[in-house]
Image (cartoon, helix red, strand yellow):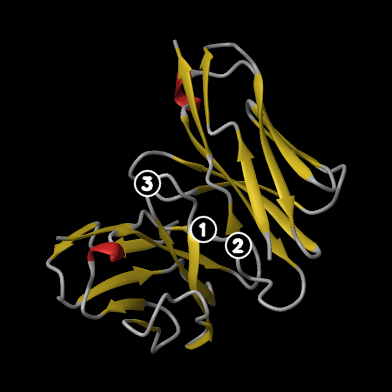
Amino acid sequence: EDQVTQSPEALRLQEGESSSLNCSYTVSGLRGLFWYRQDPGKGPEFLFTLYSAGEEKEKERLKATLTKKESFLHITAPKPEDSATYLCAVRHSGGSNYKLTFGKGTLLTVNP
Amino acid sequence: GAGVSQTPSNKVTEKGKYVELRCDPISGHTALYWYRQSLGQGPEFLIYFQGTGAADDSGLPNDRFFAVRPEGSVSTLKIQRTERGDSAVYLCASSSGVGEQFFGPGTRLTVL
């Protein structure tokens, strides 16, 4: 059974203070690791998909990286508007390969 | 372009009542998914449609839950004899084939 563990559960940063969020996963044949951002009262907003170890993707202040066991979401010089819950999800190969298994998320708060 | 829309945004009902939640996916997306998100948790898979048929309903918690997609576009999630434990945010997502899933804003269901 696929498992996704995100840490920390909550992270409080000062504006401009760079940090990383972790997503550890166990999956039988990874067919995509996904990062989403979720604001309060909203649905998850797609950020990145990573498919293979060593892959990196960037968008503004966010950079996602992938190894064989975990993914990191690096946030460089964050701003208050980056405050949100960041969700990680995996999809496995083989049967039911459309289904996403999510972690519980990391609640990021960036103080001005 | 228009994203995934869900109605109603909020639904309050009494224990034992029947409810219907509607999802309108991104135009042209053949795949549609329902997830359920409880407070402090990541979304959990309920059911997957490819076209009009439910390809996988293994995530539905019990037979009080049912979903349809009669014309391969709009989907309705139906819950009979609601229980307090059904209270959650119900999220709908759609994708083009087995690609990135794009989520709607969700319906917050409260069972009193």
Q: Nearer the viewer, residue A40 or B87?
A: B87
Crowding near the residue tagged with mark 1, few <14, some 14–19, many ≥20 C-alpha atoms within 10 Å: many
* Front one among B85 and A42: B85
Do dots 1 and 2 share one subunit? no
User: Do callouts 3 and 2 point to residues on the same chain?
Assistant: yes
Mark 2 residue type: Leu
For this view, does B6 lie left or right of residue A50?
left
Q: Secondary structure at mark 2?
A: loop
- Check disc 1 and report the residue beneath it: B102
Q: Amino acid at mark 3?
A: Lys
Question: Chain under label 2?
Answer: A
Q: Is residue B22 above or below residue B108?
A: below
The disc label shown at residue A42, or none: 3
Q: CA distance from mark 3 to mark 2?
A: 18 Å
Q: In front: B16, or B21?
A: B16
Separation of marks 3 and 1 at Cα, in angstroms: 12 Å
